[in-house]
């Protein structure tokens, strides 16, 4: 149980285009999902916290107009990178908190590798 | 602001050796501590979660301890195997359903 999927796993796009990444909790309901970014050989940095039915909370330095987050249901959150630039190339990972069971435990998706050319 | 530090940054050991990875955090008021494994270019695999009221957790050859008051955790790997080669990440959160703060990880290589 507690499986989180992400789609796509890899995407290559041209500079200036937008890319949408989906994060789904497959067998549980997630009231909160988190989006992280990981640059090569670096650790994960939190980008935003996404609560179902409300606006996402962004970390300092993360442009909310560039990284659009929508959490429309208890099983789906999306991250849209708008007007992507090469510096947005990174590994994006989402996680979801399990609504029941051990509070505070998070399950991570497999990640999405974004390359902007 | 919570900061998580992992030492060493990289470690290379011969197969069969027991090893310890270290994690420290600056704010001892944590809710949970989790250890993850990350293979190159892949996502995270949760290894062990220690709740703040617990002192250790075990899973197979892995044992994680937590000393909340001193802000430290260790991950002990017994009888290491080449398949254990990966980056190991330590992360904490300050309350239930809040984001994790990650260390930079320890890159482990187990040599056959």
Image (cartoon, coloured by chain):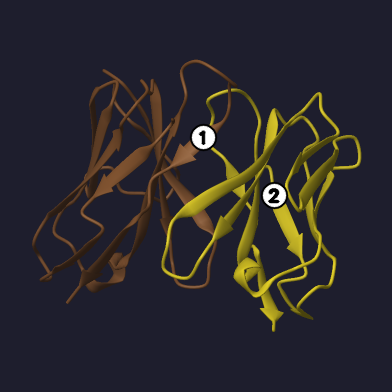
Chain colours: A brown, B yellow
Q: Position of residue A1 (x, y in %)?
A: 44, 30
| Residue B28 found in image quarter | top right
Q: Marks 2 and 1, Cα distance to the nearest angstrom? A: 19 Å
Q: Residue at x 70, y 77 (%)?
A: B110
Q: Are marks 2 and 1 in contact (CB under 8 Å)?
A: no
Q: Residue at x 36, y 38 (%)?
A: A4
Report the front residue among B14 and A86.
B14
Q: Quadrant of the N terminus of chain B?
A: top right
Left-right relation of A51 to A42: left
Q: Residues within 10 Å of mark 1 (few under 14, many from 20)?
A: many
Task: From this view, report whether residue B72 is shown above or below residue A73.
Answer: below
Give the residue number, with chain letter if any, for mark 1. Answer: A106
Q: Position of residue B30 (x, y in %)?
A: 73, 31
| Residue A60 found in image quarter | top left
Residue A62: which disc? none
Give the residue number, with chain letter if any, for mark 2. Answer: B3
| Residue A40 found in image quarter | bottom left
Q: Is residue B30 visible?
A: yes
Q: Are marks 2 and 1 on the same chain?
A: no
Q: Quadrant of the C terminus of chain B?
A: bottom right
């Amino acid at each position: 149980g507690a499986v989180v999927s992400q789609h796509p796993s890899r995407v290559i796009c041209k500079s200036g285009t937008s890319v949408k990444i989906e994060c789904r909790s497959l067998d549980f309901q997630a009231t909160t999902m988190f989006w992280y970014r990981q640059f090569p050989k670096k650790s994960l940095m939190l980008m935003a916290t996404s609560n179902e039915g409300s606006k996402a909370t962004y970390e300092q330095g993360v442009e909310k107009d560039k990284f659009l987050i929508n959490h429309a249901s208890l099983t789906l959150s999306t991250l849209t990178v708008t007007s992507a630039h090469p510096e947005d190339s990174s590994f994006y990972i989402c996680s979801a908190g399990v609504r029941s069971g051990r509070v505070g435990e998070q399950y991570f998706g497999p990640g999405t590798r974004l390359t902007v050319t | 602001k919570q900061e998580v530090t992992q030492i060493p940054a990289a470690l290379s050991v011969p197969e069969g050796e027991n090893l310890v990875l270290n994690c420290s955090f600056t704010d001892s008021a944590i809710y949970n501590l989790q250890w993850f494994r990350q293979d190159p270019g892949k996502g995270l695999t949760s290894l062990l979660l220690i709740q703040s009221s617990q002192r250790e957790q075990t899973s197979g050859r892995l044992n994680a301890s937590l000393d909340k008051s001193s802000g430290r955790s260790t991950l002990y790997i017994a009888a290491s195997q080449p398949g254990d080669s990966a980056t190991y990440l330590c992360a904490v959160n300050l309350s239930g359903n809040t984001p994790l703060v990650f260390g930079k990880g320890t890159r482990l290589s187990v040599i056959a």
